[in-house]
């Protein structure tokens, strides 16, 4: 349902469930940040739980615990989400608490200063984790114009120095009903919940919509980047651009990734691990973005095998484009995707998360169409996908190697 203030709500009722989940998505993430705001979306996520008008201090957290529930939040490049997983009798209070949290936060100054230390410590742990550093470098390499290059964790310097006024200004700019999706999933009284949403989120004042960030990326020449760090083995992301979340090719993208590197029967695993023994692990995936998406391959290996791995990835993709795949490969990939999809809908939280995410990303029909589209895919669709998106000159390889290999 779309409210006059711009907010969207989704109700997914299951009378057989003993539990429920309430999730609030806010379309505010690292893509919305200027360099002087790096990490502010994540910092704000922490501060939202420091008390609100009707639930000051830690009252909300205690209420959730007393009801046997669980409250948490997370920040991504394109959104922030807040959620409560609860037994079915706690749904109404969960809605009231989350509504007050996102609509009436207090942002106590002493709590802000205390939380700076917590978030700066998180940033330091992030920088001490090789795979996290590599992930950030990979996105910075692929995206040169798109705001998707922005790191989620942000800058310790920004967090240490950002003023309370700047924090509140960022909140007022982005935490507006037009950029929110509220999802209630599980066992609940639909009439009561609709009325409660009207009285809480529905009363949130309509606000001007800020300028949307640039998320699309133009095709450009790929790069080979090698970093050195405190690691025992080599790590690498290999990637190229794919479709955005609203393109028809988004369905075949997942299938193509599964055929290429999804599991021990995939092309890359059989070639790089079983036959050539030059990786410790290899996997491929498609990352759907509201802007330009990414097809990427992740691998761990002995540093001496770096170039051989790059060559074999290229060889395997070109073999698919030139010679196709077998029916067995296609059906195995379809079965893998259908199984994963089934497991991603097991709990009220799972259902709420996937429904709200695709609503927020502007492609709500994806949830209902996904499996039907996957079922209809043919070998030719996989081949055409790689022919369309795999352009050798645009491939980027970003590797992290042990310092001992530095020449």
Image (spheres, rainbow, N blue to C red):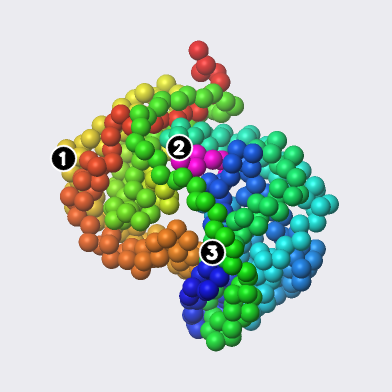
**What separation in Å lies between label 1 and label 3 (alpha carbons)?**
48 Å
- Give the residue furthest to the top: 407
Q: Residue furthest front?
A: 208
**Residue ID at (54%, 40%):** 150
Q: Judge the density around disc 2: few (<14), some (14-19), many (≥20) Cα neighbours within 10 Å.
A: few
- Percent from the top left, x then y, of residue 253? 32, 50
Secondary structure beneath dot 1 equals helix
Between tags 2 and 1, which lies in front? 2
In the structure shown, which secondary structural element does the residue marked by tag 3 occupy? helix
**Residue that mark 1 sits on:** 323
Between the residue at mark 2 and the residue at mark 1, the CA separation in whole angstroms equals 35 Å
Residue 74, visible in the rendered structure: no
Please state the extent of the stretch shown in magenta in the rendering. 145-152
Q: Is residue 82 visible?
A: yes
Label the magenta part by its dominant secondary structure: loop
199 lies above or below 244: below
Location of mark 2 (residue): 145
- Residue under label 3, please give it: 178
- State left or right for residue 173 relative to residue 143: right
């Amino acid at each position: 349902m779309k409210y006059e203030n711009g907010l969207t709500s989704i109700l997914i009722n299951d009378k057989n469930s003993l539990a429920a989940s309430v999730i609030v998505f806010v379309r505010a993430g690292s893509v919305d940040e200027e360099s002087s705001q790096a990490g502010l979306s994540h910092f704000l996520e922490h501060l939202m739980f420091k008390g609100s008008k009707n639930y000051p201090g830690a009252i909300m957290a205690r209420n959730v615990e007393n009801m046997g529930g669980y409250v948490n939040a997370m920040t991504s490049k394109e959104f922030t989400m807040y959620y409560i997983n609860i037994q079915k009798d706690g749904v109404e209070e969960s809605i009231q608490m989350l509504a007050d949290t996102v609509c009436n936060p207090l942002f106590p100054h002493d709590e802000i200063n205390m939380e700076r230390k917590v978030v700066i410590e998180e940033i330091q742990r992030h920088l001490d984790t090789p795979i996290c550093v590599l992930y950030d470098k990979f996105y910075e390499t692929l995206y040169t114009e798109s705001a998707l290059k922005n790191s989620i964790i942000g800058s310790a310097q920004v967090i240490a120095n950002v003023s309370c006024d700047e924090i509140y200004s960022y909140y007022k700019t982005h935490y507006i009903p037009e950029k929110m999706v509220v999802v209630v999933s599980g066992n609940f009284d639909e009439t009561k919940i609709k009325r409660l949403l009207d009285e809480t989120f529905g009363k949130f004042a309509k606000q001007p919509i800020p300028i949307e960030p640039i998320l699309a990326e133009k095709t450009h020449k790929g790069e080979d980047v090698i970093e050195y760090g405190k690691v025992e083995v080599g790590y690498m992301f290999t990637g190229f651009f794919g479709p955005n979340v609203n393109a028809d090719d988004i369905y075949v993208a997942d299938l193509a990734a599964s055929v290429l590197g999804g599991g021990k029967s995939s092309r890359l695993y059989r070639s790089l691990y079983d036959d050539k023994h030059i990786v410790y692990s290899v996997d491929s995936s498609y990352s759907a973005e509201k802007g330009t998406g990414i097809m990427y391959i992740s691998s761990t290996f002995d540093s001496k095998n770096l170039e051989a791995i790059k060559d074999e990835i290229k060889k395997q993709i070109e073999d698919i484009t030139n010679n196709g795949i077998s029916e067995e490969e296609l059906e195995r990939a379809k079965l893998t995707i259908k199984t994963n999809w089934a497991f991603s809908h097991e709990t009220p939280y799972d259902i709420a998360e996937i429904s709200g995410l695709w609503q927020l990303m502007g492609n709500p029909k994806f949830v209902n169409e996904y499996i039907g589209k996957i079922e209809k895919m043919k070998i030719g669709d996989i081949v055409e996908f790689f022919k369309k998106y795999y352009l050798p000159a645009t491939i980027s390889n970003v590797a992290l190697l042990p310092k001992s290999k530095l020449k």
